[in-house]
Image (cartoon, rainbow, N blue to C red):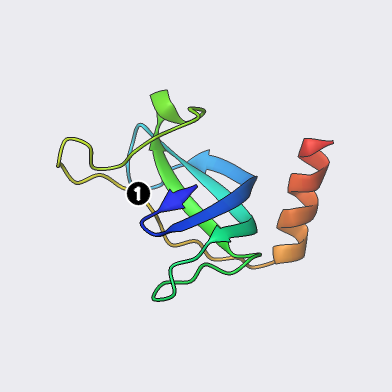
Amino acid sequence: MQNGASTVRVGRVLVYPSPIAPGRTIRVFEVVQVIRENPSNPVPRGALLALSFPNEHVNADEYEWYVDGAWEECQVPFEIKDRRANLDAASQRRN
């Protein structure tokens, strides 16, 4: 995943419908490797990123936000109440 000057490798943790934007799906990723880091905006290994995708692009290999210059939901706040339980559930889903 690339974000400006940063490049990180991620693993999928959770997927759920966006509660505020109909027709979009939130995918939560865990940063498993930092390949290139932006010193002014570091993304540490183990961080969770919640990103919003249009439903028709939710499983795409590539997606770029704001292509048409219009606002769209992109990175969204994500609160974890029990991190271990979420990661265990994701691990079970992958196996």
Residue toward you, 11 or 21: 11
Viewer-closest of 39 and 65: 39
Q: Please identify the quarter of the rendering in which residue 46 is found.
A: bottom right
Q: Quick check: 37 above or below 67?
A: below
| Residue sitting at x 39%, y 76% | 40
Asked if residue 89 is positioned above or below residue 85 in the image, the reply reads above
The quadrant the C terminus occupies is top right
**The residue tagged with tag 1: helix, strand or loop?**
loop
Residue 39 position (above or below residue 6): below
Furthest residue toward top: 56
- The image position of residue 34, as x and y in percent, is 60, 60
Q: Position of residue 78 (x, y in %)?
A: 50, 61
Residue sitting at 77 percent across and 38 percent down? 93
> Given the image, on which type of amino acid does mark 1 rest?
Cys
- Mark 1 crowdedness (10 Å alpha carbons): few <14, some 14-19, many ≥20: some
Q: Quadrant of residue 33?
A: bottom right
In the image, taking residue 92 as reference, residue 23 lies left or right, namely left
On the image, the x and y values in percent for residue 39 come to 44, 75
- Say if 35 sits above or below 73 in the image: below
Which residue is the site of mark 1? 74
The residue at 22%/37% (across/down) is 67
Q: Position of residue 58 (x, y in %)?
A: 47, 31
